[in-house]
Image: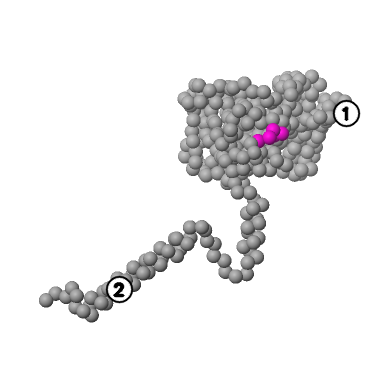
Amino acid sequence: MRDFASCFNEYAVQVSDTSCSSYSNSTSIPPSNLIPSVQNTVNCLYKVTLSNKKQVLITISWTKTNVTQGLSVHFGDDPSNVFKLNTNSRLFRKKKGIKSMDLDHYKVEIFWDLCAARYLTGPEPIDGYYLLVRVDSQLGLILGDMAEEASLRKLKNGTPMAKFSLVSRQEHFSGNTLYSTKAQFCDSGNIHDVLIRCSGENEGLKHPVLSVYIDKKMVIRVKRLQWNFRGNQSIFVDGLLVDLMWDVHDWFFNPASGIALFMFRTRSGMDSRLWLDDKDKLLLKVSLYSLSKMSEETPFYPREKLVEKQKFYQSVQKHTYLKGRYDKLTSVAIPAALAATALFMIGRGIYNMSHGIGKKE
């Protein structure tokens, strides 16, 4: 994440308010023929703080492919501390159960019920489910609209509750350059509709344009995207300063990958540095794989030509002086004129001194 942020100038911050931006009052989402991208994966990282101040990181991953759909619960940084569940009824019918795991420093229990879970187009259910995680006899994670009722029914009265908070959320999409989701920028804030859209030649534009909308109002617009393929801007949402950083380099220069990254993160104030404080909260990270074709304009000198010239000059054994078409004037004619003028002035001075010209009586 810091490698991504190192591509940007940490002091180049532009601020626009969703309530006072020139975009927000006049620009809404224009009609589009693009089919929205399809969500494939959702990764949510939670931090659980136990009563003894011990912290446990839990990652909940929801995945969906053409043939399967699954859930995985990962504990800490060890890749072996993971519980995987295939929720596709055609392959695995155990959508309800309990799983106990003995890890290195603690014991966990996972309770889940996805029998009545309801999904939209993505892999994450919207309601009709619960997911409970108990860590060392403390209820550490509660997810789902049925979680509170299930915790009262399955767990003993007086089970201690640990504190948990969402650290980051990462979503992966595939499809066109049109992406929409929902995001909550603070614990007490409203849930906002976020839409990211890249308009190109198929919509009559000469150069690709990146637009970001929150609640159907434009807050950021990046023109000539093939030149500004990395950058950052800031907006105010719910009274918070939220940084948006984007990297769409592979859309233009690496078609084999075709992945773009968008990150949202809150900051404590205008003077805080971008992306360097570990205490700041990464709200949303979007990995968008685009199948759409971007503009054919190449903003840089072809890499193949640069490599060819580099190999040529590296193969030359003698000293090489790189001269342009106008270097005959700047490197030869002007220095020669200056040297001739200097010699003339010196010679004239010597002549005047030898003949007493200009000598005062």
Q: Is residue 148 left or right of residue 326?
A: right
CB-based contact (under 8 Å), mark 1 and mark 2: no
Residue identified by numbered label 1: 91
Q: Which secondary structure, mark 2?
A: helix
Q: Give the prevailing secondary structure in the magenta stretch.
A: loop
Is residue 82 in view from this perspective? yes
Q: Is residue 293 magenta?
A: yes
Q: Does residue 27 sit above or below 323 in this rendering?
A: above
Q: Is residue 284 left or right of residue 86?
A: left
Q: Is residue 305 above or below residue 224?
A: below
Q: Is residue 240 visible?
A: no
Report the span colored magenta: 290-294
Count of labels shown?
Answer: 2
Q: Position of residue 256 (x, y in %)?
A: 73, 42
Image quarter (top left, top right, bottom left or bottom right) of the N terminus: top right
The mark nearer the N terminus, 1 or 2, is 1
Residue for point 52% across, 44% down: 9
Residue assigned mark 2: 346
Residue 168, by quadrant, is top right
Which amino acid type is marked by label 1?
A: Leu
Q: Quadrant of residue 318?
A: bottom right
Q: Residue furthest bottom?
A: 354
| Residue 107 on image: x %, y % | 76, 38
Scheme of colours in the image: one colour
Residue type, label 2: Ile
- Tell whether position 164 is magenta: no
Q: Position of residue 354 (x, y in %)?
A: 23, 80
Image quadrant where one finds the C terminus: bottom left
Task: Indicate which label's residue lies in the foreground, 1 or 2.
Answer: 2
Which mark is on residue 52? none
328 or 235, nearer to the observer: 328
Q: Residue at position x 55%, y 26% from top?
A: 218
